[in-house]
Amino acid sequence: VKTIGVLTSGGDAPGMNAAIRAVVRQAITKGLEVKGIKRGYAGLLQEEIIDMHAQDVSDIIQRGGTILQTARCMDFTTPEGQQKGAEICKKHGIDGVVVIGGDGSFKGAQKLAEHGINTIGLPGTIDLDIASTEYTIGFDTAVNTAMEAIDKVRDTSTSHERCSIIEVMGRGAGYIALWCGIANGAEDILLPEKYNYDEQMIVNHIIENRKRGKKHHIIINAEGIGHSTSMAKRIEAATGVETRATILGHMQRGGSPTCKDRVYASTMGAKAVDLLLEGKTNRVVGYRHGEFVDFDIDEALAMQKGIPEYQWEICRNLSK
Ligand code: F6P
């Protein structure tokens, strides 16, 4: 491998810049050239490719978002698009590509590998929904952002003696909701993986808590369940307790990455370059049992993960 390309794809996540910086600087340290591919696979197909030098990644480790921009690209899901992408890499002398994104982005990396481009995927998503890894770039920052926002909603909720339904991101996954549920001491947590949504149970819970003198009732609702506004109206009608919905939305994707996201993203970025130098391809980097590891992309994509049972079991016990 002589020239490495790096791209970010799918939803952005805080820490992606730290990963880009690490790819660029580790590669340059090891005598390689680096090209930045802008706007993910969409930019690859448009040949939006720039040379990257060590100074091009100065002053970005602390920034949210991605300096390379990102996109979700339907054209790259077709065989024609994938072949064109590989040809463009070859035309620009790119023989290894580091793809920072989620499962969908890894499928693209798998296809580039099939066309002879060495590829390494780095898990970049706030959702934590990649089965091959216990850590994804951006989750730590996003969950801390959400936690702080929920603390603020709780202040006003308590003052007004309201029930607050706070909807957090995560697409079909409930990790942000579970973590915030525990960290914010929510009275109820609604997760798509544990979909047992029984509105009457929530209504009873609110009424019981009121009788016990509780001044607020925080419900963390995962995006995968959604409908927070209509849920708030129904709950208010059934309980007589004023109920408001707050959808945290894209604020969870922005902001300066936490220390953990900077350090893990940097380590993963450097590891991706080292794997390419070892001649590896079609691999994804992950973090498991305290170590940075790598898996075959096909194996990684076939893995399954669920909500940690014990944490799910205890969360209700902890909020009395
Ligand atoms: O995958 C990250 C994520 O923020 C999800 O939590 C959410 O469902 C989705 O992206 C939102 O996508 P968009 O920014 O395209 O609306």
Image (cartoon, grey):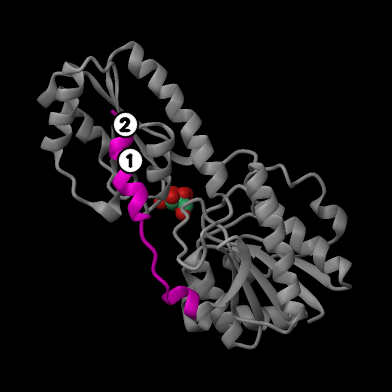
Dot 1 lies on which element?
Answer: helix
Queried whether the magenta region covers residue 30, the answer comes back as: no
Question: Measured along the vertical axis of the image, is residue 162 above or below residue 230?
Answer: above
Spatial CA distance of label 1 from label 2 is 7 Å
Residue neighbourhood size for the residue with mark 1, other residues' Cα within 10 Å, grouped as few (<14), some (14–19), many (≥20): some
* Closest to the observer, 190 or 59: 190
Residue lying at 53% horizontally and 77% vertically, measured from the top left: 297
Horizontally, residue 172 falls left or right of residue 80, namely: left
What residue sits right under mark 2 in the picture? 319
Residue neighbourhood size for the residue with mark 2, other residues' Cα within 10 Å, grouped as few (<14), some (14–19), many (≥20): few
Q: Is residue 67 visible?
A: no
Horizontally, residue 305 falls left or right of residue 28, namely: left
Residue lying at 68% horizontally and 82% vertically, measured from the top left: 280
Residue lying at 49% horizontally and 80% vertically, measured from the top left: 298
Question: Measured along the vertical axis of the image, is residue 275 above or below residue 308?
Answer: below
Q: Is residue 4 visible?
A: yes
What residue sits right under mark 1 in the picture? 315
* Residue span colored magenta: 299-320
When asked about the image quadrant of residue 203, the answer is top left
Queried whether the magenta region covers residue 304, the answer comes back as: yes
Horizontally, residue 32 falls left or right of residue 314, namely: right
* Closest to the observer, 279 or 205: 205
What is the three-letter code of the residue carrying label 2?
Ser
- Answer yes or no: do the residues labelled 1 and 2 have beta carbons within 8 Å? yes
The x and y percentages for residue 143 are 49, 41
When asked about the image quadrant of residue 232, the answer is top left
Q: Main secondary structure of the magenta part?
A: helix
Residue lying at 67% horizontally and 81% vertically, measured from the top left: 118
Q: Give the quarter of the figure containing the C terminus.
A: top left
What is the three-letter code of the residue carrying label 1?
Cys
The x and y percentages for residue 303 are 42, 73
